[in-house]
Image (spheres, grey):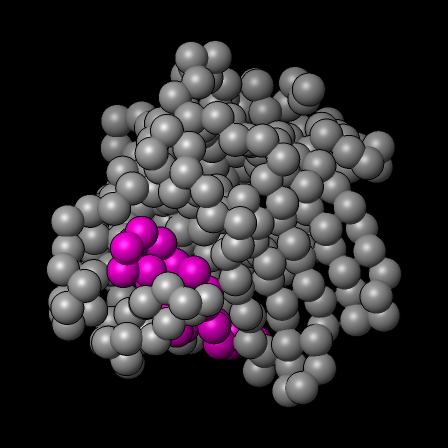
């Protein structure tokens, strides 16, 4: 979904990577009365995420003045030995068309995930350094670090509330804190609260404290549907707030999602393919 929106994506510990592009999940056996936070989060990160995913998404970014930018993104991902690869290519508008991000998300939490960004105006791809991964991805409320999942072993967890309903669905409320300064620098986050659905083992919403600027990110997953028996959020909304002011909002709507798509192949995830565009 270490797991992966993966998804979008995914960072279940912080509520972003597990819901951005790694969002598809199926429930792993764990009792709703479980009180071991580390065990709960390990189950969230270890759930089945499906394979060979193809998605088309609309990203709507709104600033504090209410101005909107709408972008359409195509995404492909697949499991590989030792992790998962993902390619995102912007389809529209024209000024960002063929801008692309290639990610190699390693299962080994001790190994830095690899990311390359291709900008058509420069006609070359650039590797994203660890120092830059906390930066905004294409001006959105998602960061480059949000595009990868993290190893639960890199975080300290505790159950803040054993029962915290969201939209009528019973959830665990889990607090997560990165253990190392390296993890804090790479993600840009110091703490998060994650509401995890007990029935789906899917983070439904998160509150994330951002180190820089005393900001908070608020994430909510919505329109959750099953595809081939796998729960898939079809909308994610992130708000970045400072005090009582909303600085920006990003809404990611999944226009289409396919799992186990035979058209996805290893050759889709190379720097050469990254630079070819649509």
Looking at the picture, does residue 173 appear above or below residue 40? below
Front residue (pair 118, 32): 32
Q: Is residue 138 above or below residue 89?
A: below
For image coordinates 31% across by 46% down, the residue present is 3
Q: Horizontally, is 270 left or right of 122 in the view? A: left
Region rendered in magenta: 192-213
Residue 246 pos. (x, y %): 70, 76
Using residue 33 as the reference point, say whether residue 171 is left or right of it: right
* In this view, 255 is above or below 161: above
Q: Residue 8 in the image: state x and y as whole percent.
A: 50, 47
| Picture quadrant of residue 250 | bottom right
Quarter where residue 140 is shown? bottom right
* Residue at horizontal 84 percent and vertical 66 percent from the top: 66
Prevailing secondary structure of the magenta residues: strand
| Of 41 and 266, the residue lying toward us | 41
Answer whether residue 202 is magenta in the image: yes
Residue 14 visible to the viewer: no
Q: Quarter holding the N terminus? A: top left
Q: How many marks?
A: 0
State the image coordinates of residue 59 (x, y, percent, origin top left): 68, 46
Q: Is residue 84 magenta?
A: no
Q: Quadrant of residue 30?
A: bottom left
**Can the viewer see residue 83 in this picture?**
yes
């Amino acid at each position: 979904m270490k797991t992966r929106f993966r998804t979008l994506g995914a960072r279940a510990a912080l509520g972003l990577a597990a819901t951005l592009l790694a969002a598809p999940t199926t429930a792993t056996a764990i009792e709703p009365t479980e009180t071991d936070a580390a065990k709960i989060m390990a189950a969230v990160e270890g759930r089945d995420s499906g394979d060979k995913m193809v998605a088309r998404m609309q990203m709507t970014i709104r600033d504090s003045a209410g101005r909107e930018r709408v972008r359409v993104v195509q995404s492909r991902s697949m499991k590989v030995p030792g992790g998962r690869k993902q390619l995102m290519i912007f389809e529209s508008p024209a000024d960002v068309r063929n801008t692309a991000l290639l990610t190699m998300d390693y299962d080994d939490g001790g190994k830095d995930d690899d990311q390359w960004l291709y900008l058509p105006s420069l006609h070359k791809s650039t590797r994203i350094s660890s120092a830059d991964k906390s930066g905004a991805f294409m001006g959105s409320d998602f960061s480059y670090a949000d595009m990868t999942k993290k190893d639960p072993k890199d975080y300290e967890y505790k159950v803040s509330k054993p029962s915290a309903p969201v939209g009528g669905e019973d959830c665990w409320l889990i607090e997560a804190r990165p253990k190392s300064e390296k993890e804090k620098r790479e993600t840009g986050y110091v703490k998060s609260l994650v509401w995890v659905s007990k029935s789906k083992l899917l983070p439904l919403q998160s509150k994330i404290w951002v180190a820089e600027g005393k900001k908070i990110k608020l994430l909510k997953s919505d329109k959750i549907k099953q595809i081939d028996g796998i729960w898939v959020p079809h909308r994610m909304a992130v708000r970045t707030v400072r005090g009582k002011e909303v600085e920006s909002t990003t809404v990611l709507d999944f226009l289409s999602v396919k799992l186990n798509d035979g058209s996805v192949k290893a050759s889709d995830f190379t720097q050469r393919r990254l630079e070819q565009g649509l």
